Image (cartoon, rainbow, N blue to C red):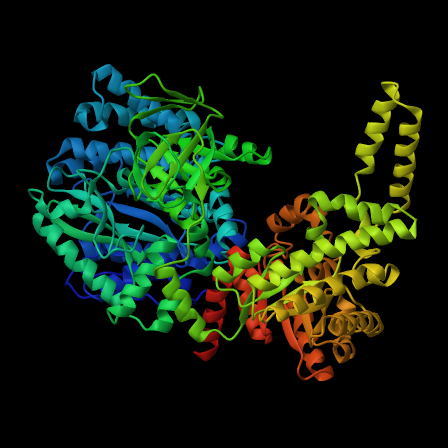
Amino acid sequence: MTADVKRVYAFGKDAGGNNVTEGNKDMKNILGGKGANLAEMALIGLPVPPGFTISCQTCMEYANANNTWPEGALDTIQEYRLDLEKRIGKRIGDAEDPLLVSVRSGAPMSMPGMMDTVLNLGLNDESVYGLIKHTDNARFSWDSYRRFIQMFSNVVMGLDGDLFENAITAKKLARGVKSDTELSAEDLQELVAEFKQIFSQNVSAEEHPELVVDGAVAFPQNPDVQLKLAIEAVFGSWNNPRAVLYRKQNKIADDLGTAVNVQCMVFGNKGETSATGVAFTRNPANGEKEFYGDYLVNAQGEDVVAGIRNTSPIAELKHVDGLQEAGKELEGVFTILENHYRDMCDIEFTIEQGKLWMLQTRVGKRTAAAALHIAIEMEKEGLITKEEAVCRVDPAQLDQLLHPQFDKNANYDVLARGLNASPGAAVGGAVFSAADAVKAVEEGKKCVLVRWETTPDDLAGMIAAEGILTSHGGKTSHAAVIARGMGAPCVCGVEQLKIDAEKKEAALTGTDIVIHEGDMISLDGTTGIVVLGAVDLVMPELTGDLDTILEWADEYRRLGVRANADNPADAQLSRDFGAEGIGLDRTEHMFLGERKQIIQTFILNEDEEVRKEAVEQLFEAQTGDFYGMFKAMDGLPVIVRLLDPPLHEFLESPRALDVEIARMEATGADAKEIAAKRELMDKIDSMAEQNPMLGLRGCRLGIVYPILPEMQVRAIATAAAKLKKEGLDPKPEIMIPLVSTVKELDKMRGVAERVIAEVAEEQGVELELPIGTMIELPRAAVTADEIATKADFFSFGTNDLTQTTFGFSRDDVEAEFIPQYLAEKLLPYNPFATVDPGVAKLVKMGVELGHEGNPDLVCGVCGEHGGDPDSVKTFHKIGLDYVSCSPYRVPLARLAAAQAAIADKQ
């Protein structure tokens, strides 16, 4: 950036009441979400404390220059600071009547609780007396100063917050009181002195020479130093571990940066006519049209979200003495904001001695159920169009609606009740720290994170856990907001639980019940109940609002949506979820369980008669499977992929067999039995491949062992013929896996067509079974024009296409180095989760060349990417005919496909 680029923007009014706001809600990439919305609220005349915003781009300039300020930036900030003082008629740090400011982060994409804030900036040993003089409230003033020192020390200097909390606890014990609010002005003044001493003892003079006074570190008294360090800390919080993890989880780019908002403080802790709160214009849990949220009288904003004090519901505010008028005005503001943004809004406000101030608004985070309900209701109200309603629901959020719920028929005793903060049900062993949650999951155990209240540092554990349980906090606490965003079940504010994190246990008040680490507990985040032990969970049905949105989505989408299913039960489930057919039936999954012995007999026996008998057994089993699949999907296509994996995958592990032989020898087992086991191990060893993914599998397996594809095609055709005779309309399609040349497909197609003709003649029915191939090798994609001459359809297997394009073995790399690649930004995201642009180019090439070879070619995707919303939108642009995914992701794909079509139209 050049020196003349605008880095700072004012918002709010000047001393004459004129609006001098320089931004608006469409400038989120520059001002961040918070700054853009502060500007917008100021523009529409809402009461916003004045301030200025330092741009997101300045943050990235600062970070990319190794935390060095760009030329002229500090001078510009100083100009805007002086202008703010002129607009307010007060100076920061003034000994007579000080202006206090907040320094808050605000990224372009909402990242609640992930970055840092500093409040009450501008207080020092002199200005605190100016505040006392102006407010005539010594207790409030000393409380504000101690809060500032505590927050500045933790956020800016990185000191452990417990150093200060322990000092407060000691002071309360010494005074014989339970609550912070019971401490006197003198107590708080003493705490300020103690806090400054803690600061001096724990901040490094070498790292912060600007804080050294008379040879020792001292809490900064100069407002210029306070402001500069606070802004740098907020910029720095863009790259703190929890913010980085949050961005990774939510696919937010790392190069956006955060804006910094410097804003005049207003105080909710100036007595009983002051309050602070967080609210939503509609219920973010279920979408009902009601004012929803929490407030606290005589408190500051962090008290509400920290869960330190129990809050009151927002609906009561207009009935509280001294707050009635502000409460009524607030409800009017809710309506103004919702109509202006045409969406449900999340609001932070403060009432200072009866006057309402708006501190923030943004489009509110909500559960999937609420997102659906709000979208439908707003369409009915005429606020948004049907297209907008479809686009308002995040497809990835629909996973929440497919989460388990308590079985209505299950018997259980409710242990405790809390707030139903985030819907869905969870069962797992209790853990009492984020680290233990992560460890439990690494060990393959399901867990529930139990905390007094979560903090942003708990994010990794919250992601790992099945659900979250806290003993404090309301529906807008950190735990509640983050859980709702992640779709994790959460129960908050279970006051009966007395949690001892160090002992890793929680006692239930009034009983002798103690939950220890590892004890199974169950949560229902929809009702707010906690159960000791494991409750049976069931999957919810697709009804109501979800049905409505998906029906609307189906009106707009062009892409078909099929499912990957390998048995009749999954086929029926897919149909129930709205799948328009089966895009991938992996027949190797039908060879597991009891049938594994049959396929092993075929593989390991060289006697042709024995092999033939094994194939006959597999034929009978496969015919029954296909009959059930085709019947469940009657009238809809079912693509059956012929056997794909290498045969050794059906055999025993040679390592386990080696151990068994050693044990037999050590225990003196029969020599003949040992010899038979050794012979078996020799056969298995002879089939080992250096790189099985690139070995004897796919169509190569069918070419080497033609009896297998013949058996499978005969089973498919026989099942179809049987159903046709019953008057049904089966529509199977046969997919040849892993072809790399047109001659491979031609040979395998010839085998299939011969067998289909034989079955049709035997059964006396007409059978027209399309035959296509799976494009999962780069050579197949670049020679698709040739291959298409022998194919009725292409199905792109993007899992293997990703492996062969990158040269990655998915089973090896996802755990070994993909995390490091993501951390070092060598990859923007996991290419096995969201389709890579390079792989997408191969798919596009395959589609275009394929249509040159066969204009009637049908093209789809059947890899896991078919259920990833971002990938679905890519496949829409490429021009595929359908995507196929796991049954539970069919609703996501339907919605994502509609949103892609609407975006195209717009």
Query: Along the horizontal axis of the image, is 295 left or right of 614?
Result: left
Query: Along the horizontal axis of the image, is 293 left or right of 108?
Result: left
Residue drawn at x 70%, y 59% as measured from the top left: 623
Query: Along the horizontal axis of the image, is 516 left or right of 756?
Result: left
Q: Considering depth in this image, is 664 or 453 the residue closer to the camera?
A: 664
Q: Considering depth in this image, is 162 or 100 the residue closer to the camera?
A: 162
Q: Considering depth in this image, is 74 or 445 the residue closer to the camera?
A: 445
Task: Please say if 550 is above or below 318.
Answer: below
Task: Please say if 457 is above or below 765.
Answer: above
In percent of width and height, residue 292 lies at 23, 50
Q: Say which quarter of the image contains residue 143.
A: top left
Task: Please say if 51 is above or below 265.
Answer: below
Residue drawn at x 34%, y 27% as measured from the top left: 164
In percent of width and height, residue 223 lies at 31, 43
In percent of width and height, residue 431 lies at 47, 29
In percent of width and height, residue 396 lies at 47, 57
Q: Is residue 392 visible?
A: no
